[in-house]
Amino acid sequence: MMVNKILIIGKDSCMFVDPAKDLNTEFGMLKASEMLAAKDGDEIRTHKGNRFFVVRPTTPDLIRKVLRLPQIITLKDLGSIIVYTGIGPDSRILEAGTGSGVATCVLGSIAVNGEVVSYELRKDFIRVAKKNFELFGLKNVKIIDANIKDGVDEKDFDAALLDLPDPWEVLKVISSAMKTGARICCYLPSITQVERTIKELPTKLSVERLVQNLELDWKTALERNVLRPESSGITHTGFLLFLRKVEK
């Protein structure tokens, strides 16, 4: 079921609305009828007088609610994937390795007038991914239960994301499905995978960049005069190898 409303209290706390139930929280009770009647930006109060604000959920909110089986690509890496592959509202995107479908959901949310075609072999992953597509309310995503190494029937993709352990076995197969100038991102945990991918790169593809993102949040408790880096952050998750199709 697509989530249409969430409730915000404080700077980073959110609660998802179930339209059939009153919401009991540590801050007091909220009636379902009031939550459903509220519009974006409206303030509603619990029976204890605590304030909530009603907003429409966006990608970072919905990702808190997704089901997960395999490890997902983090938001810090997805940001680079979107920008460096040039994905936009009209993009047709090919994906291999749907997993839990979180990257698929993010890409589908951006390519609102386009399409995401995603290949996945594991049926348990497919079941979870489809539930996450429903959460995001996506109609422009197609998941294919097949091995992408056997070929791609669709053509004219603007971008591709390969979340596979052995992309060197796939690149020659998918390169003919990509438009000239299209970009491909290979998400790879180990640098040895990157090295082999580059060594076995088809002649139609060239390396555009290799990225490793490190993320460090800051603690912002100004009421306690604290403004400093957190003691831990998201360090290595994966290498992003960006390729570009340079000839037909």
Image (cartoon, rainbow, N blue to C red):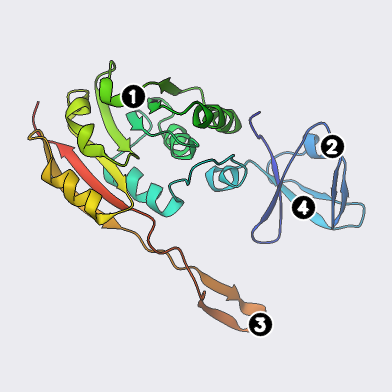
Quarter of the rendering occupied by the C terminus: top left
Picture coordinates of residue 214 (x, y %)? 37, 63
Which amino acid does the dot numbered 3 rest on?
Arg
Picture coordinates of residue 74 (x, y %)? 45, 51
Element type at mark 1: loop
Quarter of the rendering occupied by the N terminus: top right
Q: Give residue 147's mark.
A: 1
| Dot placed on the residue nearer the N-terminal end, 4 or 2 | 2
In the image, what residue occupies the spot 80% across and 35% down?
Answer: 37
Report how far apart the C-alphas of labels 3 and 4 lie in the structure.
24 Å
| Dot placed on the residue nearer the N-terminal end, 1 or 3 | 1
- Identify which residue, 155 or 198, lies in the foreground: 198
Kindly tell me whether residue 70 is visible in this rendering: yes
Kindly tell me whether residue 91 is visible in this rendering: no
| Dot placed on the residue nearer the N-terminal end, 2 or 3 | 2
Element type at mark 2: helix
| Dot placed on the residue nearer the N-terminal end, 4 or 1 | 4
Report how far apart the C-alphas of labels 4 and 1 lie in the structure.
47 Å
| Dot placed on the residue nearer the N-terminal end, 3 or 4 | 4
Q: Which residue is mark 3?
A: 224
Q: Residue furthest bottom?
A: 225
In the image, what residue occupies the spot 55% across and 27% down?
Answer: 127
Report how far apart the C-alphas of labels 2 and 3 lie in the structure.
36 Å
Q: Which residue is mark 4?
A: 52
With 234 as the anchor, is 203 left or right in this view? left
User: What crowding class fits label 3: few (fewer than 14 Cα within 10 Å), some (14-19), or many (20 or more)?
Assistant: few
Q: Which residue is mark 2?
A: 32
Which amino acid does the dot numbered 2 rest on?
Ala
Picture coordinates of residue 138 (x, y %)? 52, 27
